[in-house]
Amino acid sequence: MLGRWYTALGVNLVLGVPAVVPIWLLYYTVSTWVDPAPEENDGFGVVLVGAGLPAAACGFLWWLANRPLARRTRLRTAPYWGLSLLGTFAPTGAIIGIGFAT
């Protein structure tokens, strides 16, 4: 059961649900860095602590869960990591799609 592709997809879908917050924080950071609003002048230190630490923690937990799973699955390296990224970003994509649909 552990060697199947749907196990990797399921694990990464579950990991993608709490990853919505750091993904959104990174998107918000980049979008305000490109076109800052006048009231967004707190500096980069706040962004580093507020967005960087949750994103780094989420990325570390994602890597920690996927590294042993990648060795046990029957998929080759590139398809496994592509499937993992797709599964992780799927909940964020679903939220964006629901937002555009309404």
Image: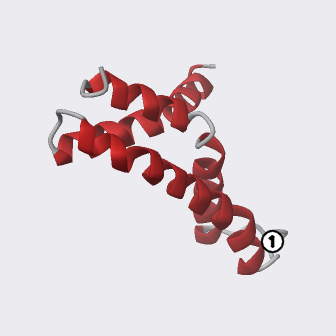
Q: Position of residue 17 (x, y in %)?
A: 59, 33
Q: Quadrant of residue 47?
A: bottom right
Relative vertical location of residue 83 with respect to residue 52 in this rendering, above or below: above
* Residue under numbered circle 1: 38
Q: Quadrant of residue 10?
A: top left
Question: In the depicted view, which residue is nearer to us: 3 or 83?
Answer: 3
48 on left or right of 12: right
Density class for disc 1 (Cα within 10 Å; few <14, some 14-19, many ≥20) is few
Q: Residue at x 35, y 46 (%)?
A: 68
Question: In the depicted view, which residue is nearer to us: 20 or 75?
Answer: 75
Question: Which quarter of the figure is the N terminus placed in?
Answer: top left
Relative vertical location of residue 66 with respect to residue 49 in this rendering, above or below: above
Q: Label 1 is placed on what type of residue?
A: Pro
Q: Residue at x 35, y 25 (%)?
A: 7
Q: Position of residue 60 (x, y in %)?
A: 52, 58
Q: Position of residue 89 (x, y in %)?
A: 46, 39
- Colouring scheme applied when the structure was drawn: secondary structure
Relative vertical location of residue 5 with respect to residue 66 in this rendering, above or below: above
Question: In the depicted view, which residue is nearer to us: 76 or 21?
Answer: 76
55 on left or right of 48: left
Q: Residue at x 58, y 64 (%)?
A: 30
Q: Residue at x 68, y 73 (%)?
A: 48
Question: Which quarter of the figure is the C terminus placed in?
Answer: top right
User: How many badges with numbers are in the image?
Assistant: 1
Q: Position of residue 53 (x, y in %)?
A: 66, 65
37 on left or right of 89: right
At mark 1, the secondary structure is: loop
